Image (cartoon, rainbow, N blue to C red):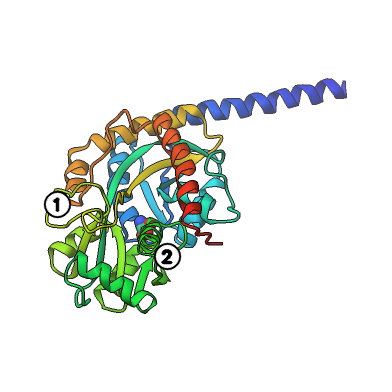
């Protein structure tokens, strides 16, 4: 009899659990959703996320809150989401760093390919090479000569090992066969504050964090990191034009949930992301910042998974060819 009761109660617990999952997927979201940004507030990833979060919130009928968990080049925030409950209430918006960190860290507290459920690609953002307003070089040619000559006397801000700003600097230093003094921040938001204040010399950062300061003349800009010039900063040459051949770096962003999230919840989030990216205000704001929302067929789990897989392989090769091992 005891066995029957135990079996029955086990079945009941299982049924209740199944019921709970079913109900939660159906009612999702019934409470605010948090998107973790693995960098400081006020930086480029934060800016992109806040625009998308506001539009997703309208679509989901729930508040979508942005939480900044900066540090260790984005790996702290990513690790926090990997370890979060897979209930759809804690998400991660991260960029290319998701694919470079495995090549830069000897060990990570998460596996980008197995610890996350992909929701969709979000945007792809060009970077700009910028400096404090009174930095000596006046154009890209001067800058390249200046870096070669002054190397470690130049302070170069980045958001830590694994950040896009770190990757960009690493590729430039490798191409020019020199080293600058890297100064890590928890995000390029605070790094921009120091660049504006003249406490730091240089940085390479997404247009989403630099365009308005460049337009206002508050910082110097030398180049874009994409193979083509860009519409919002048409006077800026490409690094390739400056003689750093084939330089091509644009920063893709994706939205993730912890692995094990109910596929119905992932589907709901993908649909909300697609609506958010089609939102006119998001499109206009992105365009003013030098970027664009990806089309709906890219804002999908399959597209983000394919990007992540391809980029992990690519950066592993590039980073090891550059002879860089950060940790
Ligand atoms: N996107 C910046 C970087 O990777 C960090 C940030 O968003 O603050 O350097």
Q: Nearer the viewer, residue 238 or 97?
A: 238
**Residue at 38% across, 55% down:** 164
Mark 2 sits on what residue?
186
In the picture, which quadrant includes the C terminus? bottom right
Question: Where, by quadrant of the figure, is residue 179 drawn?
Answer: bottom left
**Residue 132 image offset from top left, x and y in percent:** 24, 73
Task: Work out which quarter of the rendered image holds the N terminus and state it.
Answer: top right
Total numbered circles: 2
Front position among marks 1 and 2: 1
**Disc 1: CA contacts within 10 A as few (<14), some (14-19) or many (>=20):** some
Residue 189 higher or lower than 93, as above or below: below
Q: Quadrant of residue 106?
A: bottom right
Q: Residue at the location (49% across, 61% down)?
A: 72
Specify whether residue 89 is in view.
Answer: no
Q: Is residue 52 above or below residue 59?
A: below
Tell me residue 192's x, y (percent). Answer: 29, 68
Q: CA distance from mark 1 to mark 2?
A: 27 Å
User: 14 or 223: which is nearer to us?
Assistant: 223
- Pointers 1 and 2 in contact (CB under 8 A)? no
Q: Is residue 126 in sight in this rendering?
A: yes
Queried on whether the Cβ of the residue with tag 2 lies below 8 angstroms from ligand 1, the answer reads yes
Instruction: Where is residue 159? Give x, y as percent.
Output: 40, 63
Name the N-terminal-most of marks 1 and 2: 2
Residue at image mark 1: 232
| The disc label shown at residue 240, or none | none
């Amino acid at each position: 009899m005891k066995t029957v009761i135990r079996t029955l109660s086990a079945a009941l617990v299982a049924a209740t659990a199944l019921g709970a999952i079913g109900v939660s997927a159906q009612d999702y979201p019934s409470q605010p959703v948090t998107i973790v940004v693995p960098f400081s507030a006020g930086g480029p990833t934060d800016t992109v996320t806040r625009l998308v979060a506001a539009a997703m919130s309208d679509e989901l009928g729930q508040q979508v809150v942005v939480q900044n968990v900066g540090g260790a080049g984005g790996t702290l925030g990513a690790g926090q989401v990997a370890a979060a409950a897979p209930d759809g209430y804690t998400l991660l918006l991260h960029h290319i760093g998701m694919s470079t960190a495995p090549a830069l860290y000897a060990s990570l507290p998460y596996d980008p390919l197995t610890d996350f459920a992909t929701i969709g690609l979000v945007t792809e953002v060009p970077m700009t090479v910028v400096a404090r307003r009174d930095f000596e070089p006046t154009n890209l040619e001067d800058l390249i000569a200046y870096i070669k000559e002054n190397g470690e006397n130049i302070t170069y801000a980045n958001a830590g090992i694994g950040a896009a700003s770190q990757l960009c600097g690493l590729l430039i230093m490798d191409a020019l066969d020199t080293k600058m003094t890297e100064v890590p921040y928890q995000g390029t938001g605070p790094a921009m504050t120091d660049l504006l204040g003249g406490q730091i010399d240089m940085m390479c950062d997404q247009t989403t964090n630099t365009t308005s300061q460049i337009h206002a003349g508050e910082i110097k800009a030398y180049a874009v990191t994409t193979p083509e010039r860009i519409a919002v900063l048409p006077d800026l040459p490409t690094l390739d034009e400056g003689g750093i051949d084939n330089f091509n770096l644009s920063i893709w962003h994706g939205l993730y949930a912890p692995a094990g999230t109910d596929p119905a919840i992932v589907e709901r989030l993908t649909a909300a992301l697609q609506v958010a990216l089609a939102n006119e205000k998001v499109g206009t704001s992105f365009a003013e910042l030098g970027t664009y929302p990806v089309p709906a067929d890219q804002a999908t789990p399959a597209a983000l998974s394919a990007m992540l897989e391809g980029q992990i392989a690519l950066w592993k090769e590039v980073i090891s060819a550059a002879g860089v091992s950060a940790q």
